Image: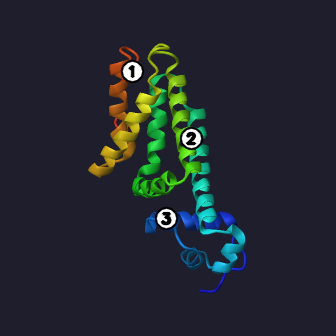
Amino acid sequence: MPRRKSVPDEQILDDVLGLIERVGGAPSFAAVAAASGLSPATLVQRFGTKEAMVAAALARAWDRLEARTERAVAAMAPGPAGAVDLLVELSGDYDGGGYVDGLVLLREDLRRSATRARGLAWLHRLETAVDAAIGGTGGADRPVGRLLVSLWQGELAWWGFAGQGRAGDHVRPRLEHLLRTVLPGAGPGPRPEPGHR
C-alpha cells in the first residue's frame, strides 16, 4: 500500500483504537504503521513511545465519551424519567458490538492511572446528573444516583451475556423498577413499547 504523506494525528489515534478493539491489547508501532499507511519511524517522531501513542488514543476515546455524556445530560428532562432516559441514551453506544469493544478498551483503561481517574470522574458525573434530575426526591439521606448508575452498569453486563435485543430496551425496565422501589410514588410511569412513540 502506498504511504500516505499526511495523516492527521486524530486519524492515527482512531486507527490505534480500532486495533485495540480488534486485537485486544496495545498495538505495536508496526501494527499502527500498517493500519495508517505511515512508517514506524514517523509514528515514533509523532508520539515518542508506544505507551504515549496508546495513552493519547485512550484519551481521545474518553474525550468523545465525555462530550457525548455532556450532550445527553444537557438534554435530560428533570425527574426520575429523565434520569432513566439519560442512561438509556448512553446505552445506545453498546449496540452493534460496541459493548465488547468497550470492554477491550476498558481493560487498557484500567491499566493506566490517568484513564482510571477519568473513568471514576465519569461515573461521578453520571451519579451527580442522576441525583440532580431526581431533584432530591429521595431526600438528602437517600441519594440514588450511584445506585442507579451501578445497576445500569451491572445490567449492561447481563444484557451482554444474554446477547438479545437492544441495550436500552434491556436496561430501561430494570432502572424504572429500582426507582419505583427506592422512591415510592416518584418512579417513572409506563413507557410506550419501542417503535410506538
On the question of residue 151 being in view, the answer is yes
- Identity, as a three-letter code, of the amino acid under mark 1: Gly
**Residue bearing the label numbered 2:** 69
Disc assigned to residue 44:
none
121 is higher (above) or lower (below) than 161: above
Q: Earlier in the sequence, mark 3 or mark 2?
A: 3
> In what quadrant of the picture does the C terminus appear?
top left
Image point (36%, 28%), residue name: 176
Q: Position of residue 24 (x, y in %)?
A: 43, 65
The picture quadrant where one finds residue 185 is top left
Image point (54%, 53%), residue name: 112
The picture quadrant where one finds residue 186 is top left
**Residue bearing the label numbered 3:** 20
Q: Position of residue 120 (x, y in %)?
A: 53, 40
Q: Nearer the viewer, mark 1 or mark 2?
A: 2
Image point (32%, 26%), residue name: 177
- Identity, as a three-letter code, of the amino acid under mark 2: Thr
The picture quadrant where one finds residue 70 is top right
On the question of residue 197 being in view, the answer is no
Q: Secondary structure at mark 1?
A: loop
Asked if labels 3 and 1 touch by Cβ distance under 8 angstroms, the answer is no
Q: Earlier in the sequence, mark 1 or mark 3?
A: 3
**Residue bearing the label numbered 1:** 187
Q: Nearer the viewer, mark 3 or mark 2?
A: 3
Q: Earlier in the sequence, mark 1 or mark 2?
A: 2
Asked if labels 2 and 3 touch by Cβ distance under 8 angstroms, the answer is no
C-alpha gap between disc 1 and disc 3: 40 Å
Image point (32%, 20%), residue name: 181
